[in-house]
Amino acid sequence: MTDPMTDTDVAIVGAGAAGLAAARTLGELGVPFVLLEAAHRIGGRAYTEEVAPGAPFDLGCHWMHSASRNPFVAIADAHGFDYDKLGFNRRMRIAGAWASAAEEAERDAFMAENSEAIARAAAAGPDLAAAEVTERAGRWTALYDYFFSIWTAHDVDQVSIVDLEAYDDTEENWPLKQGYGALVARHGAGIPVTLDTQVAAIDWSGKAPRLTTPKGEVRAKKVIVTVSTGILAGGHIRFDPALPDWKQEAIAGLPLGNHNRICLVYDRNVFGAAPPRGAAVLDEGAGGAGGAEGAEPMSFSIRPFGYDYVVGLTGGRFADWLERAGTAAAVDLAKENLKRAFGADIVKHLVGHNVTAWRGDPWVRGAYSAALPGQATQRRRLAEALDGRLFFAGEATSTGSYSTAHGAHLTGIDTAQEVAKALGKRD
Ligand SMILES: Cc1cc2nc3c(=O)[nH]c(=O)nc-3n(C[C@H](O)[C@H](O)[C@H](O)COP(=O)(O)OP(=O)(O)OC[C@H]3O[C@@H](n4cnc5c(N)ncnc54)[C@H](O)[C@@H]3O)c2cc1C
């Protein structure tokens, strides 16, 4: 795109999982499109970097959730990517020792009871916050709240139980050896995209909307907007006329939370022959394991696929706080947790790190969306087109697979089909 004005049928804003899927679908249907991406790369929140030669690390999506219904499994097969089917399997490390089988069972029962309480309350209504219906004073409450903040990127008082219940979870979570971000990029490799091109404004007042970019204007019959609700809520794209109030309420009802990954790289294996795949480190505070007076729990993926690194996870407000404190503080905290769990020697052979900062990412502004209490219906509202010209896709518009890469991908396909149909080009 070098002309000051480009004319096309469809302009797609954003080349993440949703935008790439929309572009591929339009291409297959023979609909001309332009795909505009603000960043220097495709993939958005799907992004893999090597932290050491031959050691890929997913900064964003990592697990193929609900794998038996996840189209990326077939895509991985087609591209020869490897994955395993072992799931999370995170054991607990309490006061420097592995938790007993009885403690693990007690924790699992606690987690299951909270899930059932959410299901019951969501069915009965009204749409409350998860904090209002889950156990607040149990031995495992702090651990539950911690994992909740990883799953939803928000804290328990911020998330709608109806939205939680709508999530289509088969409990099959399969990680990719070469990286989920690498898979999304590989699958999108042949798709024509204009990188380093931020859409600053969309004028949809006329019959053919106009998009303003630093490389010129694009005029299209239809526009598919796939940017995150963080970008939409922050006003980083100017809409003229302004989006109607109901659409702005939908965006505000589906804020992006935060979830960061702290990857600590070793020059050797310090965890022994067959360490558990993951460890949740708990402090024995006065409130019990991970109790109110203990430190914030932190869970780690340990040597995924045998790579010489561990990944500490943070979520919700705590992730925001730690991101503001900076990379060095995040690395220090992860090291302290590892030492607490495995002894001082465990950090001896660390040689590097890679710490994400999704809230500060200028093209995302957070990690993924959750519906605020009472706002579960907003996903459908966000997905609704405006005047048959302005269409919306992306993870936050998915009602059952929100906050996932495959959910974003599927909304891209659906929206592209809708747009093609509106153009009279669906076969
Ligand atoms: C830390 C983390 C862990 C995650 N873990 C998992 C997981 O294990 N499994 C899973 O399935 N999902 C996971 N997710 C969620 C998943 O990555 C996202 O739901 C999905 O990738 C979102 O895709 P999208 O296309 O909707 O949005 P995005 O990926 O955000 O794509 C939108 C694109 O728009 C671009 N853009 C923004 N503004 C503009 C503009 N003005 N002009 C042009 N382009 C613009 C952005 O650069 C971006 O490329 C995780 C996410 C994070 C952050």
Image: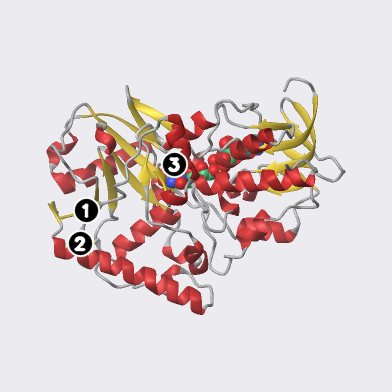
The mark that comes first in sequence, 3 or 2, is 3
The residue positioned 80% from the left and 43% from the top of the image is 424
Residue 317 in view: no
Residue 239, which numbered label? none
Query: Residue 237: x percent and y percent?
Result: 69, 42
**Residue 307 position by quadrant:** top left
- Residue 225 against residue 171 in the figure, above or below: above
Residue 208 in view: yes
Q: Residues within 10 Å of mark 2 (few under 14, many from 20)?
A: some
Find the residue positioned furthest to the bottom.
Answer: 124
* Mark 1 CB lies closer than 8 A to ligand 1: no
As helix, strand or loop, the secondary structure at mark 3 comes to helix
Going by the image, does 119 lie left or right of 91? right
Mark-to-mark CA distance, 3 and 1: 26 Å
Query: Residue 181: x percent and y percent?
Result: 45, 35
Point out the image quarter for the C terminus.
top right
Query: Residue 227: x percent and y percent?
Result: 62, 43
Q: In this rendering, which labeled residue sits more in front, label 3 or label 1?
A: 3
Tag 3 residue: 73
Asked if the residues shown at circle 3 and circle 1 are in contact, with their CB atoms under 8 angstroms apart, the answer is no
The amino acid marked with disc number 3 is Val
The mark that comes first in sequence, 3 or 1, is 3
- Residue 373 against residue 296 in the figure, above or below: below
Find the residue positioned furthest to the top.
Answer: 2
Residue 104, which numbered label? 2
Tag 1 residue: 91
The answer to which of 26 and 249 lies nearer the viewer is 26
Going by the image, does 390 lie left or right of 40? right
The amino acid marked with disc number 1 is Arg
The answer to which of 401 and 25 lies nearer the viewer is 25
